[in-house]
Image (tube, rainbow, N blue to C red):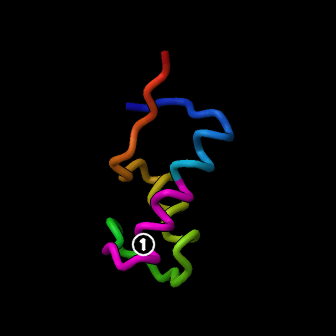
Amino acid sequence: MNVIYNRFERARIISARALQISMGAPPLIRTSGTDAVEISTEEFNREVIPITVVRE
């Protein structure tokens, strides 16, 4: 499912996931990155983040 997010939605999803990772949530992918933002960005690019946007 290839959904196109605008820049604000993309930033919100990545930042929400980065917060989860920084609070101790396990990464959903294997990566060499150590920064929560890097990990969440890579997860977003691989489309594995279980966060969606509801538009009206």
Q: Residue at x 66, y 40 (%)?
A: 8
Q: Nearer the viewer, residue 8 or 39?
A: 8
Tag 1 secondary structure: helix
Residue 15 placed where, x, y %? 56, 59
Q: Nearer the viewer, residue 1 or 9?
A: 9
Q: Residue furthest top?
A: 56
Residue 2 occupies quadrant: top left
Magenta stretch holds residue 18: yes
Q: Residues within 10 Å of mark 1 (few under 14, many from 20)?
A: some
Residue 43 placed where, x, y %? 44, 59
Secondary structure mostly seen in the magenta stretch:
helix
Left or right of 48? Residue 44 is: right
Q: Residue at x 62, y 49 (%)?
A: 11
Relative to 21, is 11 above or below? above
Q: Residue at x 41, y 48 (%)?
A: 47
The residue wearing badge 1 is 21
**Which residue range is magenta in the image?**
14-26
Three-letter code for the amino acid on which mark 1 is drawn: Ile
Residue 18 placed where, x, y %? 50, 66
Residue 4 occupies quadrant: top right
Left or right of 8? Residue 20 is: left
Q: Quadrant of the N terminus?
A: top left
Q: Residue at x 49, y 21 (%)?
A: 55
Task: Tally the marks.
Answer: 1
